[in-house]
Image (spheres, rainbow, N blue to C red):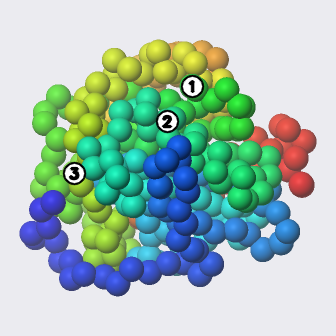
């Protein structure tokens, strides 16, 4: 991916928030890698499962440019386990399935990984899927096929159902000409964000890239099967997706079996979880989870 023209792109050493460890899960014979943190105490109240977007990896949700950015650190401090997985075709599984998987296959692989996780770790009240960009498509597809009922909600950022452009995919995520699409104004990000972000990048698998523009056709059938609460967040400088009032009304109408809320995140670009707005956004994610637990009478569990 192109990086010319971005200041401070010397290679950063891999770093982790305190308490975050590497993890691998057996996802039906496929090994998925990721990051994991458990809260202090005997058992988590629930598990936040973070699902990254296209061209990124699990570290997207554990940004290191500033201590306030990490979802993993914040979630654990509030009593939740947080699992950020490298999706199929990324991280460890890139060696096993270099071409990646379709949306339906990714959803099945995610469920298999959660099966392995539940065998090994306490899950509290269940799983909240927190997904970004292409990961939002995977999360919706996984929720549509959740026969076990263990997914208690979806929190999705940077993903709608109608693209804002019909052009080909913009340049690489760190190329100067990609700022409009992936980042927005540079003032939205802590110093050295792009130096640290370089270690989060990975090529988009071919199968995933082929499906990129088919989401608008897939969405209605997927949305009709979702039965858990869904929260969408659109950044102020989101340019990948249409998010005007009429488009959002159509988006929510397709999710007729789910309670849907839409939030607009000020002072943020597409990569919300890497910017100064990350803590504000992540607190809203976890407040949404608190509301879900309160409905179940488990807020204090």
**Which class describes the residues within 10 Å of circle 1: few (<14), some (14-19), or many (20+)?**
some
In the displayed orientation, state which residue is furthest to the front: 29
Q: Nearer the viewer, residue 55 or 240?
A: 55
Vertical placement of residue 215 versus 71, above or below: above
Q: Position of residue 260 (x, y in %)?
A: 61, 28
Q: Secondary structure at mark 2?
A: helix
Q: How many marks?
A: 3
Numbered mark located on residue 194 in the image? none
**Which class describes the residues within 10 Å of circle 2: few (<14), some (14-19), or many (20+)?**
many
Labels 1, 2: front one: 2
Residue on which the image places disc 2: 107
Q: Position of residue 73 (x, y in %)?
A: 61, 71
Vertical placement of residue 69 versus 261, above or below: below
Q: Secondary structure at mark 3?
A: helix
Labels 3, 1: front one: 1
Residue on which the image places disc 1: 144
Residue on which the image places disc 3: 180
Q: Secondary structure at mark 1?
A: helix
Q: Residue at x 59, y 59 (%)?
A: 83
Is there a contact, CB below 8 Å, between mark 1 and mark 2?
yes
- Distance from Cα at disc 3 to Cα at disc 1: 32 Å
Labels 2, 3: front one: 2
């Amino acid at each position: 991916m192109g990086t010319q023209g971005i200041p401070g792109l010397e290679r950063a050493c891999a770093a982790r928030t305190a308490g975050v460890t590497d993890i691998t899960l057996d996802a039906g014979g496929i090994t998925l890698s990721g990051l994991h943190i458990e809260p202090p105490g005997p058992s988590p109240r629930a598990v936040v499962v973070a699902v990254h977007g296209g061209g990124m990896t699990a570290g997207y949700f554990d940004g290191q440019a500033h201590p306030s950015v990490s979802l993993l650190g914040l979630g654990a401090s509030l009593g939740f386990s947080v699992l950020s997985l490298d999706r199929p075709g990324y991280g460890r599984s890139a060696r096993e399935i270099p071409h990646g998987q379709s949306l339906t296959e990714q959803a099945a692989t995610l469920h298999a990984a959660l099966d392995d996780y539940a065998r090994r770790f306490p899950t509290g009240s269940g799983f909240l899927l927190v997904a970004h960009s292409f990961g939002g498509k995977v999360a919706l597809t996984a929720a549509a096929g959740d026969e076990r009922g263990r997914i208690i909600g979806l929190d999705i950022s940077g993903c709608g159902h109608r693209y804002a452009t019909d052009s080909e995919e913009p340049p690489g995520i760190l190329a100067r000409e990609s700022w409009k699409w992936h980042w927005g104004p540079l003032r939205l990000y802590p110093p050295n964000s792009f130096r640290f972000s370089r270690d989060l990048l990975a090529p988009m698998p071919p199968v995933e890239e082929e499906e990129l523009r088919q989401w608008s056709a897939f969405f209605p059938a997927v949305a009709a099967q979702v039965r858990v609460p869904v929260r969408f967040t659109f950044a102020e400088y989101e340019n990948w997706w249409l998010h005007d009032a009429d488009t959002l009304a159509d988006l929510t109408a397709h999710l007729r079996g789910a309670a849907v809320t839409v939030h607009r995140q000020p002072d943020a670009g597409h990569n919300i979880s890497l910017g100064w707005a990350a803590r504000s956004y992540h607190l809203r994610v976890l407040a949404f989870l608190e509301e879900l637990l309160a409905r179940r009478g488990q807020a204090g569990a």
